[in-house]
Amino acid sequence: LTIKLVIYGTIAAWVSRIPVRVVTITGLGHAFLSDDNFLRRVVEYLYRFALARAHAVVFQNKDDLALFLQRGLVQASKTRLVAGSGVNLSRFNSETLPLLSLGRPTILMVARLLKEKGVVEYVEAARAVRTQNPEVQFLFLGGVDARNPSSITEAQFKALNWDKAVQWLGEVEDVVPVIRCADIVVLPSYREGTPRSLLEAAAMGRPLIAADVPGCREVVNHGANGLLIPARDAG
């Protein structure tokens, strides 16, 4: 969806002669993570055409910026780099970890149900941990995104989570109470822009575990506010 908004929106603004056209790249999406070389070439061509008609292109991490420059998708003079979309610190503020009062660790992942977010690895990791430490609670907060090619359906998730190693919370309007219940927030994603779920959890004082990939590296300082782990590795 993000790719479509950038490409179609920029071209539409150009055709409509909008005088200033600013684009934000919040992540690379399915086209760059899949093994479909034809799809990636088509998307790169469309990006190249659209971004040539933008006045400024904003990136959320240096890896995505470097990739677009390397593949000639954007002119360097047009690029800007920002540290994500920001977090409202009046809502997301540091709170005491529940482990200190409950004595039972609670792990939380906040994401859409997509393979590329590392959902499969999260469930497998939860199963392995609970085999040795059944008191550890694993939560997943997020809904199905049927428009995405890497979407995991509700039925597929239930089959994957057959032993209910992970408690699925679905979607909520306000994530603050859920993050408040967590001792650690996890995101084993394959690639990100700058993940809001990690920013919000960090703002609330939660230690993080995330894949060592673009975007997640912008938020997690390994050994300081969390741990970076190998991508696509449930172990």
Image (cartoon, rainbow, N blue to C red):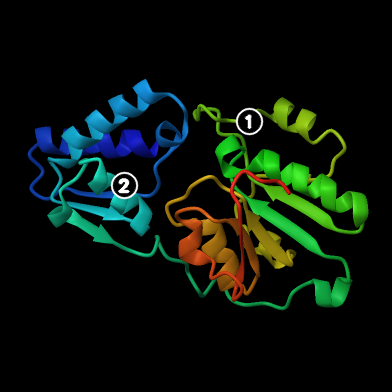
Q: Where is residue 65 in the image (x, y as percent from the top left)?
A: 30, 52
Disc assigned to residue 3: none
Q: For numbered disc 1, what is the local secondary structure?
A: loop
Q: Position of residue 211 (x, y in %)?
A: 58, 54
Disc assigned to residue 67: 2
At x 66%, y 41%, the residue is 119
Say which amino acid is labelled 2.
Leu
Query: Can you see residue 134?
Result: no
Q: Which residue is tagged 1?
A: 152
Q: Where is residue 11 in the image (x, y as percent from the top left)?
A: 18, 34
130 lies left or right of 63:
right
At x 87%, y 71%, the residue is 102
At x 49%, y 28%, the residue is 147
Q: Nearer the viewer, mark 1 or mark 2?
A: 2
Say which amino acid is labelled 1.
Ile
180 lies left or right of 191:
right
Query: Can you see residue 222?
Result: yes
